[in-house]
């Protein structure tokens, strides 16, 4: 299938009075990706999603969905997408089945088996006749996703669908979304303020801080940036690399711009690295551990600006 940008925004801005909720955001999301929109509370994630869904009008900038930019094209494109942003659509006094049937009729979906299918997809087939208000948070989140799947969307925009879930619930929702992406080919934009919740799931990440997209990177790039390594600097780094390869069999290493080396192996055996270099005529000048965990990386990215609402 040809690579296609399903969502592209440029200079996208939303201002409330003097405050920018979103400031000149620019990014594109390709068909088939799972993109994580990551940022602290109040960073502008929901506002971006609402603008994509046509629920909030941008102050400036443009949105292109499936290549279309006019109001008509956007409205048509939005029919191929579904948005789970807050949950006002469901009636808490009804069962999931009753809610889905209502939605099915309202949306004019002819397939009567569809509610059953989406409940199976999210693992809620066995809920019986429980009312939504009796659901646990995890079940409610699943129901929200079932509801979003009703119209067979090609793209799902999910605002904090794993917020407040316990670790087991996070894993379940993550696996479910990955399955939908893999088996149904659904493109997903998902927001969270906790990077580690989205880790292992996304193919790319957008970092947003104070309304600005500060970083867009693939999961490989993120993994690389978050990998632990051993920093090695010597009086002859070229020779050092050859020695480490030959004597210790280290294959996973990278030379940095300043010539120093990063080893992704032997992290727990600094002594062996140091001794091997020394015994082979290379003088180690600096050996130290480096690298970030996901959380450290997130804090470095957002300047420690976690969970802060700023006005
Ligand atoms: P959270 O993780 O808390 O949901 P968020 O990243 O989704 O946060 P938004 O809800 O998009 O953030 O809000 C971004 C900023 O815009 C916040 O400072 C918020 O107070 C402000 N904001 C959002 N909606 C409005 C509104 N209708 N009127 C005024 N300010 C608003």
Image (spheres, grey):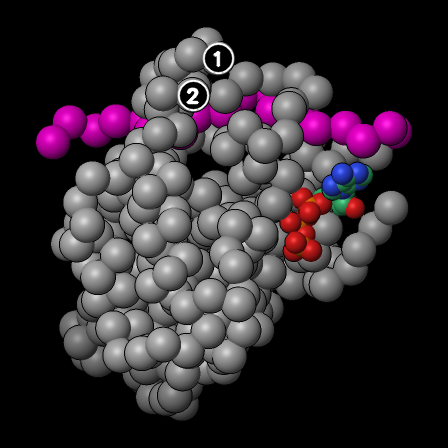
Q: Is residue 105 above or below residue 17?
A: below
Residue at 50% across, 33% down: 53
**Horizontal side of residue 35 vs 301, given as left or right:** left
Residue topped by disc 1: 71
Whether ligand 1 has any atom under 8 Å from the Cβ at mark 1 is answered as no
How busy is the neighbourhood of tag 1: few (under 14 within 10 Å), some, or many (20 plus)?
few
Residue at 17% across, 45% down: 111
Would residue 255 be seen by someone viewing this image from the given angle? no
* Magenta highlight range: 1-18
Task: Classify the position of ligand 1 by quadrant: top left, top right, bottom left or bottom right.
Answer: top right
Residue topped by disc 2: 75
Q: Position of residue 291 (x, y in %)?
A: 50, 68
Q: Position of residue 2 (x, y in %)?
A: 15, 27
The disc at residue 30 is none
**Horizontal side of residue 98 vs 54, given as left or right:** left
Looking at the image, the residue that sits furthest to the left is: 1
**Horizontal side of residue 207 vs 170, given as left or right:** right
Q: Is residue 71 above or below residue 256?
A: above
Q: Is residue 252 above or below residue 152?
A: below
Tell me the quarter of the picture where residue 260 sits.
Answer: bottom left
Q: Position of residue 183 (x, y in %)?
A: 15, 54
Residue 4 forms part of the magenta stretch: yes
Q: Secondary structure at mark 1?
A: helix
Q: Secondary structure at mark 2?
A: helix
How busy is the neighbourhood of tag 2: few (under 14 within 10 Å), some, or many (20 plus)?
some
Q: Position of residue 271 (x, y in %)?
A: 40, 90
Q: CA distance from mark 1 to mark 2?
A: 6 Å
Residue at 54% across, 39% down: 49
Asked whether the residues under the numbered discs 1 and 2 touch, taking CB atoms below 8 Å apart as contact, a structural biologist would say yes
Q: Main secondary structure of the magenta part?
A: strand
Residue 243 forms part of the magenta stretch: no
């Amino acid at each position: 299938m040809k690579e296609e940008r399903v969502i592209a925004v440029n200079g996208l801005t939303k201002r409330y009075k003097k405050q920018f909720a979103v400031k000149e955001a620019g990014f594109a999301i390709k068909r088939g990706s799972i993109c994580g929109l990551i940022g602290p509370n109040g960073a502008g994630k929901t506002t971006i999603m609402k603008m994509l869904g046509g629920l909030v009008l941008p102050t400036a900038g443009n949105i292109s969905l499936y290549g279309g930019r006019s109001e008509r094209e956007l409205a048509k494109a939005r029919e191929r997408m579904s948005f789970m942003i807050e949950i006002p659509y469901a009636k808490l006094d009804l069962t999931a089945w009753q809610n889905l049937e209502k939605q099915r009729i309202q949306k004019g979906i002819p397939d009567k088996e569809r509610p059953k299918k989406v409940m199976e997809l999210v693992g809620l087939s066995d809920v019986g006749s429980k009312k939504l208000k009796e659901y646990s948070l995890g079940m409610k989140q699943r129901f929200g996703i079932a509801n979003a799947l009703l119209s067979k969307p090609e793209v799902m925009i999910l605002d904090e669908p794993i917020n407040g879930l316990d670790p087991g619930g996070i894993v379940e929702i993550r696996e479910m979304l990955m399955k939908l992406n893999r088996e149904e080919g659904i493109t997903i934009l998902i927001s969270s303020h906790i990077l580690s919740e989205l880790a292992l799931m996304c193919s790319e990440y957008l970092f947003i801080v104070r309304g600005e997209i500060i970083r867009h990177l693939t999961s490989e790039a993120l993994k690389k940036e978050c990998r632990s390594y051993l920093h090695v600097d010597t009086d002859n780094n070229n020779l050092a690399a050859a020695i480490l390869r030959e004597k210790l069999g280290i294959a996973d290493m990278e030379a940095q711009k300043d010539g120093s080396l990063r080893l992704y192996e032997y992290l727990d055996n600094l002594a062996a690295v140091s001794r091997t270099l020394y015994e082979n005529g290379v003088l180690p000048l600096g050996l130290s551990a480096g690298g970030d965990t996901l959380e450290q990386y997130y804090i470095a990215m957002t300047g420690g600006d976690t969970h802060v609402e700023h006005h």
